[in-house]
């Protein structure tokens, strides 16, 4: 099976049909690195890594001094979702990323995601994300909260602008919590040092001996 597949860097534009047409969020995230899973000359999956949108998140994972190492695995999308394709794409792309890095990724409970593929690729489980709220507009509940907020990007006091436009149709809704996973890639000494600096409680399944 593996002989039919290869993983290679791809462009942002090559990712867009997967992100917009297949992924549930329908929103393009920050993309610093992108890789594609190719099977018999067909692009069947994409994975993207980018800077987390939240500065407190970047600083909070392992302290402000480690923020420069943080990347978020922010999209993983497969056309056919065949067995082992997800783990193959994650594992292969991690080997191709420039190192050292601290990778964080999330699995959305509201979508029924538990992050099994992250466990299979030796990510460290770090509990649930904090309880938060998102902006929402009645009749547009299908849109991501950040997409709603982006309507008034650059406007001073965006919340007031939203209320002025949408009135009582604008409201705050609870954000679904997400399972949080972390993977440290780089030399063994880097991984050992940064593992001690991770601020989230974690389980004990993570191993320093993996090769990513």
Image: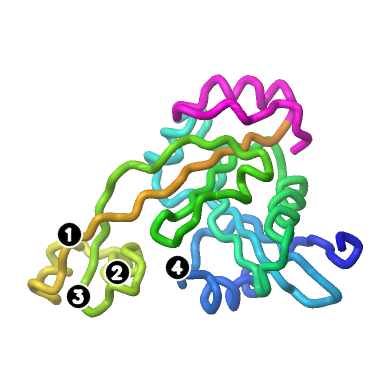
Question: Measured along the vertical axis of the image, is residue 138 above or below residue 154?
Answer: below
Residue 34, by quadrant, is bottom right
User: Per the image, is 131 magenta?
Assistant: no
Read off the residue under disc 1: 157
Query: From the viewer's perspective, is the residue at label 4 or at label 1 nearer?
Result: 4
The quadrant in which the N terminus is found is bottom right
Quarter of image, res 33:
bottom right
Disc 2, SS: helix
Residue at image point 53% right, 29% down: 203
Numbered circle sitting on residue 25: 4
Give the camera-side residue of 44 and 170: 44
Q: How far apart are marks 1 and 2 (CA)?
A: 14 Å
Q: Distance between the residues labelled 2 and 3?
A: 11 Å
Q: Observer-nearest residue: 132 or 81?
A: 81
What number is the disc on residue 138?
A: 3
* Residue name at image x 46 percent, y 72 percent: 26
Q: Mark 2 points at which residue?
A: 148
Task: Report, in whole angstroms, how far the alpha carbon at label 1 lies from the one at label 3.
Answer: 20 Å
Spot occupied by residue 133 in the image (x, y as percentages of width and height):
25, 53
Instruction: Give how far across and how far down residue 21 sits, in percent.
Output: 54, 79
Give the Cα separation between the discs numbered 4 and 2.
Answer: 13 Å
Mark 1 vs mark 2: give the one in front: 2
Q: Are marks 1 and 2 in contact (CB under 8 Å)?
A: no
Residue 102 against residue 139 in the figure, above or below: above
Name which of mark 4 and mark 3 comes first in the sequence.
4
Q: What stretch is highlighted in magenta?
A: 187-212
* Residue at 71%, 33% in the rendered image: 186
Mark 1 or 3, closer to the camera: 3
Q: Is mark 1 on a helix, strand or loop?
A: loop
Q: Earlier in the sequence, mark 4 or mark 2?
A: 4
């Amino acid at each position: 099976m593996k002989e039919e597949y290869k993983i290679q860097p791809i462009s942002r534009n090559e990712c867009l049909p997967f992100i917009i047409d297949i992924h549930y969020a329908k929103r393009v995230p920050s993309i610093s690195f992108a890789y594609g899973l190719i099977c018999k000359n067909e692009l069947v999956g994409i994975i993207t890594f980018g800077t987390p949108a939240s500065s407190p998140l970047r600083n909070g994972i392992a302290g402000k001094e480690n923020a420069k190492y943080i990347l978020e695995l922010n999209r993983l999308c497969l056309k056919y979702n065949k067995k082992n394709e997800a783990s193959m794409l994650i594992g292969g792309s991690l080997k191709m990323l420039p190192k050292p890095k601290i990778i964080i990724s999330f699995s959305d409970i509201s979508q029924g995601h538990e992050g099994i593929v992250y466990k299979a690729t030796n990510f460290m489980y770090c509990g649930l994300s904090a309880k938060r709220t998102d902006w929402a507009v009645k009749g547009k509940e299908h849109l991501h909260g950040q997409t709603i907020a982006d309507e008034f990007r650059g406007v001073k006091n965006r919340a007031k602008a939203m209320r002025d436009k949408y009135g009582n149709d604008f409201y705050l809704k609870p954000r679904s919590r997400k399972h949080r996973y972390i993977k440290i890639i780089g030399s063994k000494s880097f991984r050992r040092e940064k593992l001690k600096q991770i601020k989230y409680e974690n389980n004990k399944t993570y191993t320093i001996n993996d090769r990513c």
